[in-house]
Amino acid sequence: MRPLASFLLIAFTLAAGAAETWRWKDENGVVHYSDRPAPGAERVNVGPASRPGSTSAIAPAARTAAPAAAQQASTTQSYSRCVIATPANDAVFNAVNFVDASVQIEPALQDGHRIQVILNGRAYPDWPEAMSSYTLSNLNRGSYSLSVRVLDADGRTLCNGSPSSFHVRQPSLLAPARPAARRP
């Protein structure tokens, strides 16, 4: 069963990487990303996702060679991407009480800005504001909606990601597939 689950997870991950991505700004100037086009949206070409623990393809010398003026300008850049990387959209977890989650923010989180993860419409209070991954714990059976946004020091939204959903299933004593107890 485990090899099948691993294969399906890899297949869903590869399929998610092949999806189209659309970008648009709302009336407040907040950039949004989605897998579905919205009025006024433009298609974004997204390269392969980086793997956790992997290093950037840019050489270290090239990263440090930027002049101070360019670094100063980057502090006022808007974010081009803020998405839930894991769990994959519509992922199903069986008999678990926790789910590992991660977000992707591009460019990297800037000084004074923070990550806010929204679980079922409410800010997840335990998520560390500067961390890109965390374990969501104490999850009961049900479906969950997860999204991310980047906030500045004043709490203004700088980037608002599209929600992703996942589902937690727990075993039940009342499960119809469970064989009926025999009476003596």
Image: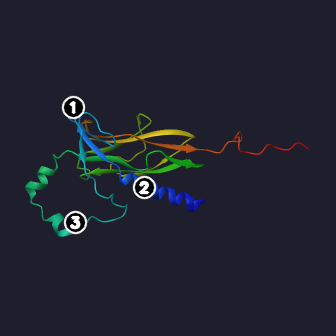
135 left or right, relative to 46: right
Q: Which residue is mark 3?
A: 58
- Total of numbered circles in the picture? 3
Decide which of tag 3 and tag 2 comes sooner along the chain: 2
Three-letter amino acid code of the residue under disc 3: Ile
**Residue 184 vs residue 112, the one in the foreground:** 184
110 left or right, relative to 123: left
23 left or right, relative to 92: left
Q: Residue at x 12, y 65 (%)?
A: 65
Q: Residue furthest top?
A: 27
Measured as percent of width and height from the top left, residue 176 is found at 71, 40
Mark number, residue 28: 1
Q: CA distance from mark 3 to mark 2?
A: 24 Å
Three-letter amino acid code of the residue under disc 2: Thr
| Secondary element type, mark 3 | loop
| Secondary element type, mark 1 | loop
Measured as percent of width and height from the top left, residue 5 is found at 55, 57
Q: Is residue 85 above or below residue 40?
A: below
**Residue 21 vs residue 60, the one in the foreground:** 21
**Residue 6 vs residue 70, the one in the foreground:** 6
Q: CA distance from mark 3 to mark 1?
A: 33 Å
Q: Residue at x 52, y 49 (%)?
A: 98
Residue 153: in sight, yes or no?
Answer: no
Measured as percent of width and height from the top left, residue 70 is found at 10, 55
Q: Which residue is mark 2?
A: 13
Number of residues whose C-alpha sits closer than 10 Å to that of mark 3, classed few (under 14), some (14–19) or many (20 or more): few
Decide which of tag 3 and tag 1 comes sooner along the chain: 1
Measured as percent of width and height from the top left, residue 167 is found at 52, 43
| Image quadrant where one finds the C terminus | top right
